[in-house]
């Protein structure tokens, strides 16, 4: 067996072990060390130590714990119910007003936290009963919560984009600028779909009663001023500081963390217990991310030493693909990988396989990263590992079955594909803003 074949066997064994439920980070390290010992002997242990230190000293990753802390603290500030109530009042005259308010709340809250499970769970507890009690179709209501909760993976400040930037050597600032408009495009497609469906078939989203519509404008404005505006200002302060070059991503993340503390204090939710819980969750998740990076670097280094990339490169180059065909092939493979795997596994293990091939086809890693971030939405929405569906099922009423949730997700999954097709045909949606700001 040649070394490239050993590398492919190493990749196959890794996927099999992950599918069996072994921890990803330590499986990556174990496979890397075992096959690395076969390839280069004792030097693999020195490489392990060097890569562990290199990851921990990576300036880009400083933003990860700070953004996580900001998200966990905002989540515990109990502002979601106020935000949803105020947006519900503001959108009360629209078709499918509750669904529209839910999607806007999901987008804003997902952007502030970046934690899909938290957004889906909290919105499932808050917005799903409200929609069901108003007579909304349970499938559409479930799809709204699941799809809207995943937007934080794409819309900056996204943890996934930080990880991709560190893996691909791409500026996180440019990635944030490139992902902003595609993220808003996808959110806009979701809102247009629920409004259009409500206009075509009003039974899926009945109009609010006259009593619910008869709310003084002052109450609406006050609700937005005390819930929507503070969170929006926090997000725009962080994003604006990054996009306009006023701060680096980790400096802006520090601003966001401080803003989250002030926001929680303003809402009188800043207690020692909440602060301690946010710090603990931040430390736990940050440790997971760092060990994933250590494992990824070890695995990727050994995979390269075994010349596994060359086998894949020869296979791709032998197909005589055009750049567009390569992009479609790569995105189809990532889409299929999203069925059994989570986004962390796809970004850490499989995306680095495609990165060396981008230069061969003349594809900008920045554009590729936005496509991947858009595609990653599907890993939360496609069974059997559709985590957003399982998050929602865990807190949904018994009348909402898992099959209802999957059927409700299907149209939103199709909209993700539509957004990708639009981006393929109009790449300026992603590339225009970085060009304007930084060229």
Image (spheres, rainbow, N blue to C red):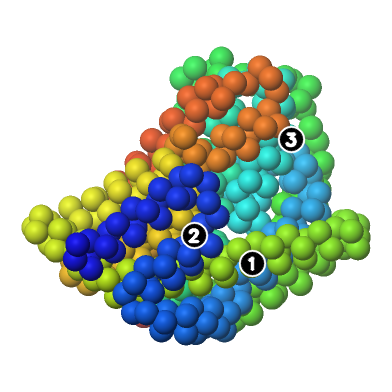
Q: Which residue is mark 3?
A: 126
Q: Which residue is mark 2?
A: 27
Q: Are marks 3 and 2 in contact (CB under 8 Å)?
A: no
Q: Residue 130: give x, y in percent of width and height.
A: 72, 27
Along the horizontal axis of the image, is 270 left or right of 122?
A: right
Q: Residue at x 56, y 15 (%)?
A: 203
Instruction: Please state which of residues 369 and 127 is positioned toward the viewer in this rendering.
Output: 369
Q: Quadrant of residue 247?
A: bottom right
**Crowding near pointer 2: few (<14 within 10 Å), some, many (20+)?**
many
Position in image of residue 212 (x %, y %): 76, 25
Could you say whether the residue bearing mark 1 is in a helix, strand or loop? helix
Q: Position of residue 439 (x, y in %)?
A: 36, 80
Is 103 situated left or right of 71 in this image? left
The picture places residue 245, in percent across and down from the top left corner, at 53, 81
- What SS does tag 2 mark? helix
Count of number-bearing discs = 3
316 vs 253, left or right, is: left
Between disc 3 and disc 2, whose residue precedes?
Answer: 2
Secondary structure at badge 3 equals helix
- At x 52%, y 82%, the residue is 49
CA neighbours of label 1 inside 10 A, class few (<14), some (14 to 19), many (20+):
some
- Which comes sooner in the sequence, label 1 or label 3? 3
Residue at point 80% right, 36% down? 216
- Density class for disc 3 (Cα within 10 Å; few <14, some 14-19, many ≥20) is some
Q: Earlier in the sequence, mark 1 or mark 2?
A: 2
Q: Nearer the viewer, residue 331 or 148?
A: 331
As drawn, 54 above or below 190: below
Residue 332 seen: yes
Residue 139 visible here: no
Which residue, given by chain and number where applicable, does mark 1 sit on?
286
The furthest residue to the top: 203
| Residue at horizontal 34 percent and vertical 79 percent from the top | 40
């Amino acid at each position: 067996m040649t070394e490239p074949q050993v590398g492919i066997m190493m990749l196959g064994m890794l996927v099999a072990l992950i599918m069996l439920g072994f921890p990803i980070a330590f499986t990556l390290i174990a496979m890397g060390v075992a096959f690395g010992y076969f390839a280069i002997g004792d030097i693999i242990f020195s490489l392990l130590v060097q890569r562990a230190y290199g990851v921990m000293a990576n300036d880009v990753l400083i933003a990860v714990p700070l953004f996580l802390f900001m998200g966990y603290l905002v989540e515990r500030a109990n502002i979601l119910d106020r935000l949803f109530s105020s947006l519900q009042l503001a959108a009360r005259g629209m078709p499918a007003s509750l669904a529209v308010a839910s999607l806007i709340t999901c987008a804003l809250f997902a952007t502030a936290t970046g934690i899909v499970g938290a957004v889906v769970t909290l919105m499932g507890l808050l917005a799903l009963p409200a929609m069901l009690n108003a007579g909304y179709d349970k499938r559409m209501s479930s799809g709204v919560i699941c799809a809207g909760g995943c937007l934080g993976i794409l819309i900056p400040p996204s943890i996934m984009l930080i990880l991709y930037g560190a893996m691909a050597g791409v500026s996180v600032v440019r990635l944030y600028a490139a992902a902003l408009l595609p993220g808003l495009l996808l959110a806009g497609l979701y809102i247009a779909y629920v409004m259009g469906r409500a206009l075509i078939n009003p039974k899926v989203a009945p109009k609010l009663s006259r009593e619910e519509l008869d709310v003084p404008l002052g109450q609406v404005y006050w609700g937005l001023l005390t819930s929507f505006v503070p969170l929006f200002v926090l997000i725009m302060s962080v994003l604006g500081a990054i996009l306009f070059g006023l701060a680096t991503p980790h400096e802006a993340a520090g601003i966001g963390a401080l803003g989250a503390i002030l926001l929680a204090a303003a809402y009188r939710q800043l207690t020692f217990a909440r602060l301690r819980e946010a710090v603990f969750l931040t430390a736990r998740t940050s440790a997971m991310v760092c060990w994933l990076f250590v494992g990824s670097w070890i695995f990727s280094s050994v995979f390269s030493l075994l010349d596994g990339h060359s086998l894949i490169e020869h296979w791709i180059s032998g197909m005589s693909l055009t750049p567009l065909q390569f992009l479609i092939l790569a995105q189809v493979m990532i889409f299929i990988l999203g069925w059994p795997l989570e986004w962390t596994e796809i970004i850490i293990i499989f995306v680095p396989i495609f990165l060396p091939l981008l230069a061969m086809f003349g594809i900008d890693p920045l554009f590729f990263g936005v496509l991947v971030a858009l595609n990653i939405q599907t890993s939360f929405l496609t069974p059997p590992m559709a985590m957003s569906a399982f998050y929602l099922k865990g807190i949904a009423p018994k009348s909402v079955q898992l099959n209802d949730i999957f059927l409700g997700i299907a149209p939103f999954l199709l909209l993700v594909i539509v957004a990708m097709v639009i981006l393929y045909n109009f790449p300026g949606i992603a590339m225009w803003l970085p060009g304007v700001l930084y060229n």
